[in-house]
Image (cartoon, rainbow, N blue to C red):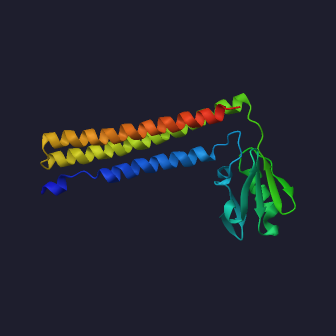
Amino acid sequence: MSQDDLEIDLDAIQRRMDGAMHALRTEFGSLRTGRASASILEPIHVDAYGQQTPLNQLGTINVPEPRMVVINVWDKGMISKVERAIRDSGIGINPVVDGPIIRLPIPELNEERRKELSKVAAHYAEQARVAIRNVRRDGMDQIKKAKSAGMAEDDQKMWSDEVQALTDKAIAAVDKALEEKQKEIMQV
């Protein structure tokens, strides 16, 4: 094997760790805090035109006030289906139909619900940590294979340290994101 074959692709490892972080941010975005956000509607799909269509493809979603999300449905015949999809989604918000506009007043969160959301956020963060550790394990497996193919002991140590540094950095980013999200959730 040539020396080039013994290189470990740190960029691929970094990309996979970044992917786990991106997934975490997406999960955090779907958590309903006390503030209105269009991202809470992202997972909602509406049975429109014979298929499940993302809500954001059926109308304009705006956040005119801190506790209000407004959906301007383009096809007036879809208003009742959009309303039903929101009610059935389990996000805990009751839509108010006002002509072609659907208003979603975001209720104040009580302390119990805040703690529950904080636990959900911690669960999402743990899933991200596990994903990052899995990427680390894959990287370490690559290093072990390269060692058996003739990688020098010093190179193995250097690559292991690099992978561990990437892992530590990614885990720290997850912890920081979790701390910020929990602070946002618990804010009254």
- Quadrant placement of the N terminus: bottom left
Horizontal and vertical percent position of residue 186: 65, 31
Query: 150 and 8: which one is in front?
Result: 8
Left or right of 157? Residue 25 is right
Work out which quarter of the rendered image holds the C terminus and state it.
top right
In the drawing, does residue 187 fall left or right of residue 81?
A: left
Q: Report whether 62 appears left or right of 121.
A: right
7 left or right of 13? left
Location of residue 60 in the rendering, given as x and y in whole percent from the top left corner: 72, 62
Give the vertical position of 33 relative to 50 (above or below).
above
Does residue 181 appear in the picture of this structure?
yes
Look at 21% across and 41% down and name the residue there.
158
Residue shown at 60%/32% (left/top)?
A: 183
Image spot of residue 13 (x, y percent):
34, 49
Q: Position of residue 154 (x, y in %)?
A: 15, 40
Total marks drawn? 0
On screen, 177 above or below 44? above
Residue extending farthest to the right is 99
Q: Residue at x 64, y 35 (%)?
A: 185
Q: Visible in this render: residue 117? A: no
- Figure quadrant of residue 170: top left
Picture residue at 69% right of the left edge, 60% below the top? 55
